[in-house]
Image (cartoon, rainbow, N blue to C red):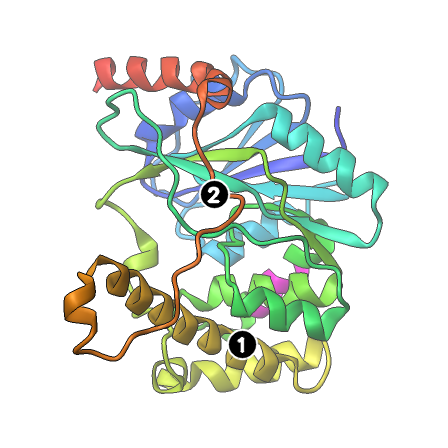
Amino acid sequence: MKNFTLIIPTHNRHHYLRRSMMYFRDLDAEVIYCDSSIEAFDEHEIEKYHNIKYLHLPNQKFAEKLLIVLAQIKTNFVALCPDDDFILINSLYRGVDFLESNKTYKTIVGKYVYFNEDFDGNFFPNGQKFPEDIDLGSEKNAKVFFENYYMILWAMYDKVILEKAFRIINQAKFHNDNYIELTIGACACYEGAIKFPKEIWGIREVSTKEHWGTRHASILSMEIAEIKGDYQKFKESIDDQTFLGHADIVMQSYLSGHVKEVVSLRDTISKMIPKFIKRWIRKGTSFKTSADKFILDDQNYGLLDPIKLLLYKDNVNK
C-alpha cells in the first residue's frame, strides 16, 4: 500500500458513507472513517471493503477523534477528506509521491471543483485565485500563505503537522471553530513548504445543510479573533510549539489578506460600472484575472466520470 492514510471524519451523516466507501474501495491505501455519532454505521457494509476501517467514537469532538486515529496510523503522510466529498485517486497517489521525493515540502493543498447537493450533472470552480508553491522558510511561508489564504483543512500532510495541530486544538478548546484551520495552517507553514498542484485535487459538495463551518463568525478582525479569549489561547499554544511571534505573523497576515479581498471586490464592481459614471467617482485599481484561471474542459471532465456516476446513483436512492 501507498505511504499515506486517508482519514474521513463523520458525525450523524451515515447517509454519505455508502457512496464514500464505494468510491474509495479500490484506493491502494488504508481509509479510516472516524464516526462520533451515537449510533454506529452498519458493520456489514464495512466488511465488504478490504482497505476500509471504521472507528465508532461516540460523542468525541473533532480534535479528539482525529488524535485517536492519528495515534493508530503507521504511515508518514495523512490526507483528510470530508464525508460528503471526494479526492481523485490519482491526485492522492501523485501527492504522496511528491512528498516522498521532495523532503522540504510537508503539505499538499489541492484545487477543488464543486457540485450542488441535488446533483444536476455539472461541476464548477469556485473562482478563487489558486496560490503558487510556497517554500520560503517558516516565517515567510506564514506571511505569504495567510495573506493569500486558501482552504487548508482538507489536504495531505506530513503526519507530524496534524499531530501537533490537533493537540493544540484539543487543549485550547477554541470557542470559534475557524481556529481549526488557522492552527493547521500555522503548523503547516512552520514545518515546511506547501505544494499547490495545478491539477484537480478533489470534488466538494455545496450544501446549506449540516455545515459546521458556519456556526461561528468568520475571523475578519481582531475584535472577533479575541472573543472568549480565543486569540490569547492561539498565541500561547502556537508560539510554544513553533517560535515566539509566529501566531502574530499568522493572524496579522490573515487579516491583511481579508482587507485585500475587500479591495479586490471593490475593483470588480468598478469594472461593471459604465465609464461615464466612473468619471464621477473615484476609480479603484484595475482588476486582475488570475493567469491560471481554472476551466473545466473536456479532459478534466473525463476525470470526474466515476464520481458523476456515483452522484447520479445517490440521487436516485435518496
Instruction: Pinpoint residue 159: horizontal percent, then vertical percent.
Output: 71, 50
| SS of the residue under disc 1 | helix
Q: Please name the amino acid that badge 2 sits on.
A: Lys
Give the mark, 2 or 1, whose residue is nearer the N terminus.
1
Residue for badge 1: 253
Left or right for 135, reference 55: right
Q: Position of residue 287 (x, y in %)?
A: 39, 61
Q: Nearer the viewer, mark 2 or mark 1?
A: 2
Residue at the spot x=55%, y=18% of the render?
25
* Magenta segment main secondary structure: helix
Within 10 Å of the Cα at label 1, are there few (<14), some (14-19), or many (20+) other Cα atoms?
many
Q: Nearer the viewer, residue 249 or 23?
A: 249
Q: Position of residue 166 (x, y in %)?
A: 58, 61
Q: Is residue 118 above or below residue 242?
A: above
Side (left or right) of 128 relative to 208: right
Q: Residue at x 62, y 30 (%)?
A: 91
Secondary element at tag 2: loop
Question: Is residue 243 in the magenta section?
Answer: no
**How many marks on residues?**
2
Residue position for label 2:
293
Point out the stretch of residues depicted in magenta.
Answer: 163-168
* Residue displayed at 36% across by 84% down: 228
Q: Is residue 123 above or below residue 44?
A: below
Q: Is residue 161 left or right of residue 54?
A: right
Q: Nearer the viewer, residue 145 or 18?
A: 145
Q: Nearer the viewer, residue 216 or 185?
A: 185
Quarter location, residue 218? bottom left
Locate the C terminus and report the quarter of the image it occupies.
Answer: top left
